[in-house]
């Protein structure tokens, strides 16, 4: 059955997609905001705990953002703008922290620099890293890969021809930076700052693990909802978590670079400079060593009896962790991640097929709804689902976690598909309509084969993030559907750090396996395509 252009079955399908997104995103958020109406907001906002947590959140997020971007900027420069050896390997290693939950980064710092931390005992450090600096350090580990990827992408696609012309004209490097680099970086860098600040500001894993008495807004919200079952006060706090995310969202919507780029950007020429390349490689080694240190201590703790009293080699903690349900909860996580990968990829790709390929008001409305999840932190989405879906057939099952994770992570894969589909020939549907070929067959036989690499990346993104998330699922999980990532906080509260470390290794192992599988599939498909030519 053909559905041509924006007519045929296109309008009903768009309507179904719009209704689905309304019920799974817009209405739950509206319900959370409505739930605030019965709460004395003034008393919540004016309370000393709230004001203190708000100040702590702003200061720690601001500090973590500045440090993350500075370190990521030099790392991106080293990877993109030098000719040092092993650049690809360093780029991969720089993204490894994205494959474990944020709470693991906090726990890694506790194990390294806490009261009984490995480095604290070995170096005799006088003060453990709890409180503000612990949150800042953990936030840097958590946000660094995101900042690095965004900055590396910006530097990769910067046109190199103006620099060549400036060099020929004898313009000094400092003037090149002020006149070429800085204007080019200004808007993208603001987007990076917004994205990193929002990521840190709305995270509760790191401050929950290492913050101590230095309470932030996400932790306060978590304590109100999980500890006190006070959903009304939690909703008020959640509304404040929306503010920076909403600001970032609005900035991206209204400040896109609309310059006409009908040319192909010329890659910036790189020449070998031993001193620069040596410094770049040394810097990357140091950064990757710091990144790997929590992972190394996780592996170490997993195979000893009891830190720090009994350091003998043993698999006892691994067996104990599995006996406490890690295997069962790992199956839950994999089931959820696979479900989110399938549902999320199909949903986001289908939406992108209409919004990118069929212009019109309905497509614009569907596009706006689809990217709205960028402005919704996981904690806020989780509490909105509790209030909206409680008592429904979905509530308490794995289906609920699949749905909330799909909506939580929808925007980024959708934008991947939207951008990829938008680059294909815009007249394919018109040609198909002229030849009597339905839109379904255009999608199946043309669009999907042309964007299969993007589809693999979308599925990988959904899987990896679903495996490691602890935000939205915190309020919706039960003993039956609990994902393994939530065991980290549980084991830490029970002082079973060895088990929490092993769970982090399990999650990392699953995500690395999926990334490797996707890489091999992409490489195989590229080689097959090249051979067929």
Image (spheres, rainbow, N blue to C red):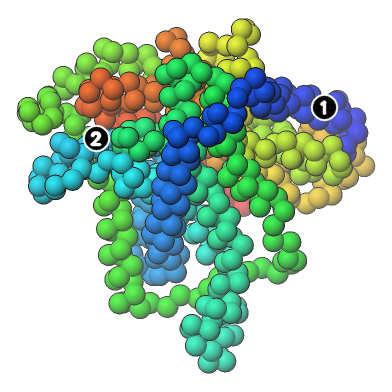
**What is the C-alpha distance between the residues marked 1 and 2?**
48 Å
Camera-nearest residue between 119 and 52: 52
- Would you place residue 265 above or below residue 128 in this image? below
Residue 43 horizontal side relative to residue 433, left or right: left
- Would you place residue 173 above or below residue 195 in this image? below
**Element at label 1:** helix
Quadrant placement of the N terminus: top right
Q: Which of the 4 image quadrants contains residue 181?
A: bottom right
Sequence-first disc among 1 and 2: 1
Q: Is residue 217 visible?
A: no
Camera-nearest residue between 503 and 112: 112
**Element at label 2:** helix
- Would you place residue 54 above or below residue 18 in this image? below
Q: Position of residue 196 (x, y in %)?
A: 50, 49
Category of crowding for the residue at label 2, using alpha-carbon neighbours closer than 10 angstroms: few (below 14), some (14–19), many (at least 20): many
Residue name at image x 44 percent, y 30 percent: 220
Give me the disc on residue 298.
2
Q: Position of residue 458 (x, y in %)?
A: 57, 38
Q: Position of residue 249 (x, y in %)?
A: 64, 46
- Would you place residue 373 above or below residue 164 in this image? above
The residue identified by callout 1 is 15
Residue 139 horizontal side relative to residue 387, left or right: left
Give me the disc on residue 516.
none
Residue name at image x 44 percent, y 69 percent: 81
Residue 493 horizontal side relative to residue 63, left or right: left
Category of crowding for the residue at label 1, using alpha-carbon neighbours closer than 10 angstroms: few (below 14), some (14–19), many (at least 20): some
Q: Position of residue 398 (x, y in %)?
A: 52, 15
């Amino acid at each position: 059955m053909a559905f041509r252009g924006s007519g045929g079955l296109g309008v009903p399908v768009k309507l179904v997609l719009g209704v689905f997104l309304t019920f799974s995103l817009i209405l739950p958020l509206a319900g959370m905001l409505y739930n605030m109406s019965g709460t004395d907001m003034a008393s919540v906002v004016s309370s000393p705990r709230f004001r203190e947590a708000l100040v702590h959140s702003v200061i720690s997020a601001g500090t973590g953002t500045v440090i993350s971007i500075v370190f990521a900027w030099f790392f991106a420069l080293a990877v993109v703008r030098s000719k040092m050896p092993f650049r690809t390997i360093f780029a991969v290693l720089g993204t490894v922290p994205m494959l474990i939950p944020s709470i693991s980064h906090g726990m890694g710092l506790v194990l390294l620099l806490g009261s009984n931390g490995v480095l604290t005992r070995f170096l005799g450090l006088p003060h453990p890293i709890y409180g503000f600096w612990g949150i800042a350090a953990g936030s840097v580990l958590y946000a660094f890969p995101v900042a690095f990827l965004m900055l590396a992408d910006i530097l990769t696609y910067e046109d190199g021809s103006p620099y060549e012309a400036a060099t020929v004209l004898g313009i000094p490097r400092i003037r090149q930076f002020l006149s070429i680099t800085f204007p080019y970086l200004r808007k993208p860098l603001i987007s990076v700052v917004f994205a990193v600040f929002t990521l840190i500001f709305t995270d509760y894993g790191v401050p929950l693990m290492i913050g101590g008495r230095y309470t932030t807004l996400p932790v306060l919200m978590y304590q109100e909802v999980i500890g006190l079952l006070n959903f009304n006060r939690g909703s008020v706090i959640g509304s404040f978590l929306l503010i920076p995310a909403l600001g970032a969202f609005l900035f991206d919507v209204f400040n896109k670079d609309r310059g006409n780029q009908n040319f192909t950007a010329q890659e910036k020429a790189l020449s070998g400079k031993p001193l620069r390349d040596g410094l770049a490689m040394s810097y990357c080694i140091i950064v990757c060593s710091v990144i790997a240190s929590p992972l190394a201590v996780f592996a170490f703790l997993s195979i000893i009896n009891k830190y720090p009293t009994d350091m003998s080699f043993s698999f006892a903690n691994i067996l104990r962790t599995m006996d406490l349900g890690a295997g069962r909860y790992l199956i839950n996580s994999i089931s959820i991640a696979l479900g989110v990968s399938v549902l999320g990829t199909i949903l986001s790709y289908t939406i992108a097929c209409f919004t990118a390929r069929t212009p019109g008001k309905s497509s614009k409305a569907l596009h706006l709804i689809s990217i709205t999840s960028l402005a919704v932190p996981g904690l806020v989405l989780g509490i909105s689902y509790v209030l909206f879906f409680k008592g429904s057939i979905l509530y308490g099952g794995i289906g609920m976690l699949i749905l909330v994770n799909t909506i939580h992570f929808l925007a980024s894969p959708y934008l991947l598909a939207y951008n990829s589909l938008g680059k294909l020939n815009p007249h394919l549907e018109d040609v198909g309509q002229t030849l009597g070929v339905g839109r379904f067959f255009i999608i199946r036989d043309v669009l999907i084969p042309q964007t299969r690499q993007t589809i693999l990346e979308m599925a990988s993104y959904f899987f990896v993030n679903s495996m490691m998330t602890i935000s939205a699922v915190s309020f919706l999980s039960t003993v039956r559907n609990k994902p393994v990532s939530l065991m980290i906080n549980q084991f830490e509260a029970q002082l079973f750090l060895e088990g929490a470390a092993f769970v982090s290794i399990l999650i990392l192992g699953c995500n690395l396996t999926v990334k490797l599988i996707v890489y091999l599939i992409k490489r195989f498909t590229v080689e097959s395509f090249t051979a067929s030519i």
